[in-house]
Image (spheres, grey):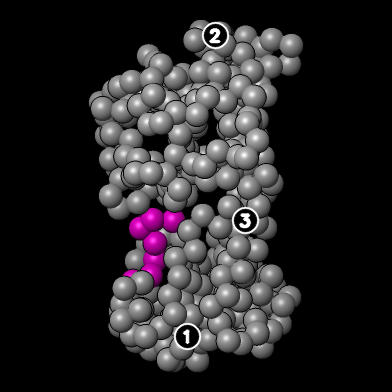
Amino acid sequence: MSGQSAGGRPLAGLVVAVVAGDEREQEIARLAAAAGANVRAHGFTPPAAPLPGVQWCDDPATALAGAHYALFPIPGIAADGSLFAPDAPAPIVPDAALLQLLAPGAQIVLGRADAGLRAAAAATGVGLVEYEDDVELMLDRGPAVVEGVLAQVIAHTDVTIHGASVVLVGHGTIGRLLARTLVLLGAHVTVAARNGVQRADARTAGAATVDLDHLAEVLPGADVVLSTVPAAVLSAPLLALLPPGALVVDVAAPPGGVDLAAARARGLRAVWARGMGRRAPVTVGGSQWAGIVRRIEAIEERRRAG
């Protein structure tokens, strides 16, 4: 692969496939082309105005064929193995048949792989570069996610956030931002988390806290429950403790943390707020690109040195 920078274009000579996603990937594709890459795109709606240097492909195979880097979206891979692509004409499953089309030594850059993608990458010799745990990038995109979640709460409730009883499950990067924002908006927030340091941090923001094992104790009075934990936490028995009309919002990536079918069967309002960074695609796409290009440049530097 050629990774030589040309006139401030660090990706000159590289073929980059941007596959799946939403408006954030529009911005990522634009920035990749501006960095000198030959960009192919598939799986998200093109912008109204053409993006110079970006070729739109009718299928993922055309986009991926011969690419040195494949950029997949941050929102997690669904249970059927498909990438987050709400506007794609068909599900995009990055199996071995697709990955073998990439150039030798190719790398996939994404939020987090699942077992299926790991197996396909291992079978085809494709590298995986995951950046969902990059705290700096998650904080940069965090405000857009929080704004998107708040929009979901406002759209699906009949009460104000101010004065509402909100149970927030999990206190990671996004949970922490949500807790602080909800407290500032006047909600009565209870954070449920296993980690004692996280609970102490939530209390400094003005939230009440419980150990996750005691979640059942705080659900009966909740107007809104927000889950940020990407593992089964809110099961049918726990959801049965919520009052009628309560809103349950699953903010986590697949497989999610809420049994949404059980919630709806119980008559609760239930929303999977996946891909909330879509609310501010230029801001979030730009922050994601900062992490992506930094990783690509590091890989190319190692190639040149080795």
User: Please, what secondary structure does the residue beneath circle 1 have?
Assistant: loop
Amino acid type at circle 2 is Ser
Which disc number belongs to residue 279?
A: 3
| Amino acid type of the residue tagged 3 in the rendering | Arg
**Picture layout, residue 47 above or below residue 212:** above
Task: Give the alpha-carbon distance from disc 2 to disc 1, as whole Å.
Answer: 55 Å
Nearer-N-terminus badge (2/1): 2
Which quadrant of the structure image shows residue 48? top right
- Could you tell me which secondary element the residue under label 2 belongs to? loop
Q: Mark 1 or mark 3, which has the lower sequence index?
A: 1
Residue matched to label 1: 246
Q: Which residue is mark 2?
A: 2
In contact (CB < 8 Å): disc 2 and disc 1: no
Q: Is residue 8 magenta?
A: no
Decide whether the magenta segment is chiefly helix, strand or loop: loop
The disc, 3 or 2, on the residue closer to the chain's N-terminal end is 2
Q: Is residue 115 left or right of residue 172?
A: left
Residue type for callout 1: Ala
Judging depth in this view, the residue of 44 and 113 nearest the camera is 44
Instruction: Look at the picture and state if 113 lies above or below 251.
Output: above
Residue 173 shows in the view? no
